Image (spheres, rainbow, N blue to C red):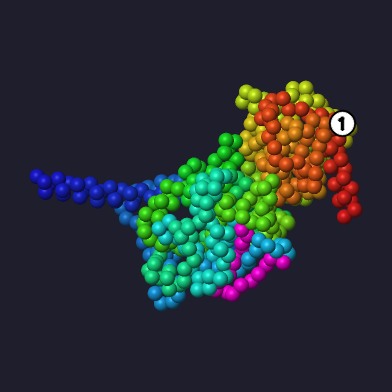
Amino acid sequence: MARGRAITLLIVVVVSCSFLLTNRFSITWTRSQHNTTLSATNSSVASVPAPPKAILVATTQAPTTQIPPSTRPVPCKSQFSENRISWKNGKIPQTTLPVHTTGDVPTSHAILVVKADSTLNGFDTGWSVFDNLYTFNGTLYIVSDEPGGFPPIREMASSGSHMGNSAEEIAAQEPSDADMQIISTAEATALFGHSISRLNGVTFWVITITLLLVFIGLWRTYSALDLHITASGDTVLPPVSRMFFPHASRAFHDPPGLNQVVLRAAFPSIAVEYIGDWHDRASTQKAIYMDRVVLTARTTSLRSKKYDPDAKMISVADNLPKSPYWWCPIRRQVLEFSGAPEEVISLNPSGKPVITYISRQGWGVAGGRKLLASAHDSLAEALKGLEASHGYEVHVVEMERLSKAEQMELAARTTIMIGVHGNGLSSLLWMKPSPSATVIEIFFPPGFETDYSVPARVLGIEHYGVWGDRYFRTESEHKPRRHQPDGFHRDQIPADGPTIAALCVERIQHSTLLSSKL
């Protein structure tokens, strides 16, 4: 009886396989000419994913008794071999870093090409770009027979422990051999063996922190490898393949949902891994080779002589060489993802100046940061008056009532963005950098924070702070220090509408005069 059941099961399996083979799905797609990938000016960079407007059409073919010979798949060499490297007949690839920016000299004098087999591929304390970096059992390894070509490990990595201010917590942030080591090729061969797994492409590696500002800093560091990025976003840099948070258990998310949208829009194929995934990789007890790694460590940035406590850790990365259009590839990717038209994405001037006041008056959090009702009315009225008196286009909006795509497109059209200190001002990332581009941030006096003045600065956008009927330029020597007085997060923030409106006119007219002189 058992034999009979086995024969019956075999017949069922054969019939099922025959059904699957004869009921094939053929998938075809039509492609738009509109390409939203990072465009490359180097023919060696190949990236041709299906455009976002691809239409997939699935059809089921009629069953046939056999697969016609002409449609049978042609055997080919497995591509899985690309995911391993072997050096049985050669030498293990050494870690490289060909451009080294020290922490002690001005950027204009900081490009140093070291020996070819041990070079620094973009470095400033806390921000590094490595080629041929290794990891084994949870430790990062630099493989080089000339370790003197690399800065001290404490200037590249940290332990990933909690950032505290006590002496014990500060000491715990120092990296140990369990975090990163520099070993010779002979030591690497003895430790790793002669064949290891490979992670192709570019990896963003983040130690201890999961903020959007860190993503901006990582791209800022990576972009130092292409000083010819164009205004239209053309770059020879390949897209980022993955992002590691080996010490973070929470996702790269924020309450407004901007982080995840930016990451997935900029790099649709990116994989993101956290502490659990990192432990899984370490538990294999096998070494991994990574083509290129852009690594940042927050505590390490604090050790740089270029660190500005008001500008936070990105102040160090912003000292690296750059194209004036370094952010344009990300901006274009995200705006194309949102569906913005080319005239909005382009950096070419278009139409009348646009003033956008991001209101928080309808924000649902009781007691949260808002203008006084009278201050809101005064500001809205003064800005609307500029439409009649100067012909400007004015928007008074609550960002939470707009879709992410609508928020991004409006920001991309905005010349001057106004708002109370808060998440809505994150939309400044999509503004066009221009002589008139300005963010006006309203604080409860005498409070001040740099969450939005910092990205504005690195993106080439002017930033002003407002206290009631006074304002100040945050890049001036008279800018205030960071401070959150009682009332900073409350709903009684004052603002003088006519003062802010006059500042808008001043910024637009000054930039117009400047442009005419150029």
Tell me what residue is drawn at x 64 percent, y 39 percent: 405
Label 1 element class: helix
Q: Is residue 257 visible?
A: yes
> In this rendering, would 340 be left or right of 148?
right
* Identity, as a three-letter code, of the amino acid under mark 1: Ala
Q: Residue furthest bottom?
A: 89
Quadrant for the C terminus in the image:
bottom right
In the image, 446 versus 409, the foreground residue is 446
The location of residue 101, given as percent across then percent down, is 65, 63
Q: Badge 1: few (under 14), some or many (20 or more) residues near its Cα, within 10 Å?
A: few
Seen at 64% across and 31% down, the residue is 400
Along the line of sight, the residue nearer the viewer: 88 or 21: 88
In this rendering, the answer to whether 381 lies above or below 332 is above
Residue 125 on image: x %, y %? 61, 58
Q: Is residue 120 magenta?
A: yes
x 72%, y 35%: residue: 447
* Residue position marked by numbered label 1 in the rendering: 388
Q: Give coordinates of residue 416: x percent, y percent.
A: 77, 40
Left or right of residue 244: residue 430: right
Res 408 quadrant in image: top right
113 part of magenta stretch: yes
**Towards the viewer: 196 or 228:** 196
Q: What are the residue bounds of the magenta stretch?
A: 109-125
Q: Residue at x 75, y 34 (%)?
A: 446
Residue 215 position within the rendered picture, expressed as x and y whole percent measured from the top left: 60, 49
Q: Residue furthest left?
A: 1
Most frequent secondary structure within the magenta stretch: loop
Q: Does residue 429 appear to the left or right of 349 in the view shown?
A: left
In-image side of 474 versus 129 (left or right): right
Using the image, determine if residue 363 lies above or below residue 213: above
